[in-house]
Amino acid sequence: EPEVTQTPSHQVTQMGQEVILRCVPISNHLYFYWYRQILGQKVEFLVSFYNNEISEKSEIFDDQFSVERPDGSNFTLKIRSTKLEDSAMYFCASSPSSHEETQYFGPGTRLLVL
Amino acid sequence: AQTVTQSQPEMSVQEAETVTLSCTYDTSESNYYLFWYKQPPSRQMILVIRQEAYKQQNATENRFSVNFQKAAKSFSLKISDSQLGDTAMYFCAFRFASNTGKLIFGQGTTLQVKP
């Protein structure tokens, strides 16, 4: 069964450094999402992406964040200058043909900012 | 703003027994989708079951079923014949029918299935 994959599984970085989190959505999916989960808290929406454009972003998704689909398979989340409060689990998700379809989540990247 | 509330932070159940997890939500929309996701210790979010608000019939997926009460804005998950592998955090989530697909999650309920 096709799966969403994410790399790396864990990332440790110093405050102020740039990080890129990578996702490979399911191959025939067209809609992509990033969510984050701070330890012990609920999962929060960051951004949705379709047709090489951001469809919607949350208040969390400020100028330090960007997303890109650099080729036909990868979907990346970049944090330009990490802060301590960016430490969280970041989940990528994708859905097939429209926003009405179920979202399938990847295993997550645990980011720790020191 | 739409909110999703799971009022039970933790629950436990004996293996083979039945357990019900509660979820309420707040919206003025009439058309939307509701989901239950499972997050085991491995941390991967796995879809358990989904419900379209326009459908009156409650969704069922093997041992998992929902009690969808649209007027009461309630969406509870029933797990029958609980298994040790059901131990996980369970999240209720809401999505508008016509938007960019953003999921709004509840706080989660940690379920422990005891042998």
Image (spheres, coloured by chain):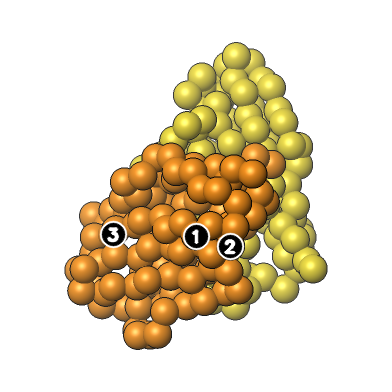
- Give the distance between the C-alpha atoms of the residues marked 3 and 2, in whole angstroms: 27 Å
Task: Give how far apart the Cα atoms at labels 1 and 2 are.
Answer: 6 Å
Question: What element does badge 2 sit on?
Answer: loop
Instruction: Identify which amino acid the numbered label 1 is placed on.
Output: Thr
Picture coordinates of residue B21 (x, y %)? Answer: 41, 55
The reply to whether residue A58 is in sight is: no
- The residue beneath circle 1 is B18
Would you say residue B77 is visible in this rendering?
Answer: yes
Q: Quadrant of the N terminus of chain A?
A: bottom right
Marks 1 and 2 in Cβ contact (< 8 Å)? yes
Snapshot quadrant of residue A114: top right
**Chain coloured orange here:** B
- Residue under the point 69% across and 22% down: A12
- Towards the viewer: A5 or A78: A5
Q: Chain ID for label 3?
A: B
Say what secondary structure mark 1 lies in. loop
Residue at image point 43% right, 40% down? B10
Could you confirm whether marks 1 and 2 are on the same chain?
yes
Amino acid type, residue under disc 2 in the picture: Asp
Q: Nearer the viewer's eye, disc 3 or disc 2? A: 2
